[in-house]
Image (cartoon, coloured by chain):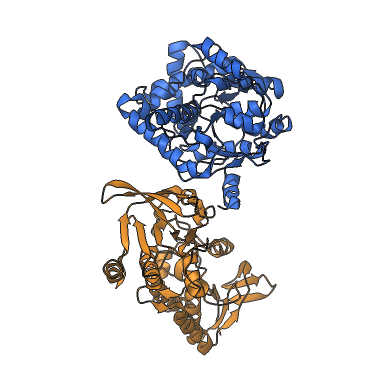
Amino acid sequence: MKKVVVIGGGIAGMEGSTYLKSMGYDVTLIEKNSQLGGHLLKWEKLFPTMRLGKDVVNFLNDGIKISDVNVLLNTEVVKAEKNGNEYIIELNNGQKLNADAVLVATGYDTFNASQKEEYGYGVYDNVITSAELEELFTSGKTLTTPSGKVPKRIGFVHCVGSRDEKVGNIYCSKVCCVTAVKQSIEIKEKLPDVEVYCFYMDLRMFGMHFEALYREAQEKWGINFIRGRLSEACENIDHSLVVKVEDTLAGKPLKMNVDLLVLMVGIVPSQGTKDIGRIFGLEFGVNGFLKSLDQHMANSNSNVPGIFYAGTCVAPRPINNTFVDARSAAVMVASYLENYKVEGRINTINN
Amino acid sequence: MKLEGKKAIWKDYQKEIADDKYFYVRSCVRQNFFPGSETAFLKILRDELKKDVYEHPCHTTCTGIGYHGDVVPFDTAMTVVARQFALMTESGYENLVPSCITSFGLYTEILETWHHFPETENKIREYLKKATGREFKIPKNLAHASDVIFKFRKEIAAKAKHKLINKNTGESLKVVEHIGCHYSKMFPSKGVGGAEYPYVLTGMIEEWGGEIIDYPERRHCCGFGFRQYLVQANRGYSIACSKKKFDSMEPYKPDMIITNCPGCPMFLDRWQYTIKEMEGKTYGQNGEGIPVFTYEEVAGLVLGYDPWDLGLQMHQTDCEPVLDKMGVGYDKSKKRELIINNE
């Protein structure tokens, strides 16, 4: 039985493992944390349907269970070498795995918001990230500011670490716009009297139903969308924040106080993605993500035969696209392992 | 406020500051605005710290005010600055220390320009050679004078006669630090602590016993802003900027303001007087203003220098409330005498 090692136990790694095992391969899924699920474990509700994140985690876990994937938790790859067509992968516990193919699904990290020094993350008490707000939702605790106050006005700052040359990330993270819309609505559901302001450059509502959610945010929930980038946030004596922003539609500067400022942090290549890329000699693209062999025709293929990609280690993707990508990657792994006739096309790209 | 967050940022913005043999270039305006400050800097460096500091009599303006006021072209500014470098080279020095923040910003901008566009440097070398016959070396180290005092803040603290502590209560004085815009806003990596949370003055204040105030309009312009003041019709905007800062810092009850720019102490000091005259409004305690100091003046007070030797009698907002809190002795009648004689 041919062996496949899948690195990373988030959505892409779990779903890819499930289908590869179902296809009849001997699959080992390696996850550095103590639990499968990745970032999704911390996400309460998902856009645009408000489905619970745990529903998706359960679905993924069912797949792993039904197909009986061998899962190694608290495990990391420290070394890899090639022996013929086979990879010998050394783990941090000293164990060695043989693999005929490797599926890299090492995912993303959220942008370190403290790099945007002018927003005061890590300096001012009541500046938090969208990921932290989601954790607060997931915890089920009452929504208060870190200072312990029930907020009366909340600001969301879009594109923190995305489309920003100053921090070196010129790409769009794809999921933050609609996440801000979703989180704004959730806040209004929990605290109907709170005023919510979203400060944005563009609203990229590309997905099915995203635009409808955006309209609902305005029409049903009265959420305010101000087009303009925040120039700075400062702390008032009562620990509320004063934000300065240019309202580019009104054509004037705007200054307001908010009790809580939520930074919509973008997606950056995870440390695991960087490490695995180095270990296997994979190519990185200009934005620091792993580079697909071809952006149109071989998204799941890498520059190294036998190594494949799934999910956000290649580029920011929403959950539905990650599912599709993982299943697609499983097919490409199978095509490689079975040497389907169509593999010749991939070799043409490679050449 | 989480101090750890600021400390993490400060770690990212350390800069190299030469420890001796400085070629010091004065500011065009500071000797009129706060005449004791540059003298105090030289005294501290030479007498207290035993450093070699050289001033060249042929040093001129760097043209920074004209450049930022849009009346001096960049090529002209670069050629004038190249001449200052030539004076430094001819004097056998390599470490340039400007007194003025705008000079520091302009020198930094020019060096960065030349770094990225070597052909521009070659062009300016030609201009200078044709105009004056001079040649120059690029400074080995460029540090603002406040960087140098920051570097030796611990040595100054070790010699302290007074601390930034209220002698009656034992509490730290609450200090507003105001950094000149041209210090690090253009090139964050060239300033101690970066652009958003500069550490250069904070480091001194902490070392000398004071407590920093972080108020909402901390980053806002002092009101000078060159064109805001130099164009007479804009002066209402200038005072509005200063007022915005005073209104913002007032709830924190600051004891004093420390600055590192020629223009900032001037405007923060003088506009307080103007606002008092116009509106009857004062921002300090007991109906007084908030005293405004240069960092050299504060270093001098810490070292026990006579306030009138430091030129504090030239401040429009009286400094005595801070002197009293620190326990600095002074001769009241001498101040009046000095002002009358100066007039």
Q: Is residue B274 above or below residue B176?
A: above
Q: Does residue A270 appear in this view?
A: yes
Residue A168 at what x, y percent from top left? 45, 50
Tell me the quarter of the image containing the N terminus of chain A: bottom right
For image coordinates 40% across by 59% down, the residue present is A155
Chain A image colour: orange
The residue at the far front in this view is B286
For image coordinates 71% across by 23% down, the residue present is B48
Relative depth, front residue between A258 and B81 = A258
Q: Is residue A318 above or below residue A59?
A: above
The residue at the far bottom in this view is A66
The residue at the far right in this view is B158
Relative depth, front residue between A101 and B238 = B238
Tell me the quarter of the image containing the C terminus of chain A: bottom left
For image coordinates 63% across by 30% down, the residue present is B324
Determine which quarter of the picture holds residue B97. top right
Residue A228 at what x, y percent from top left? 33, 52
Residue B172 at what x, y percent from top left? 64, 41
Relative depth, front residue between B95 and A314 = B95
Q: Is residue A7 above or below residue B248?
A: below
Relative depth, front residue between B4 and A321 = B4
Q: Does residue A339 appear in this view?
A: no
Residue A300 at what x, y percent from top left? 44, 70
Which chain gets the blue colouring?
B
Q: How many marks?
A: 0
For image coordinates 52% across by 12% down, the residue present is B340
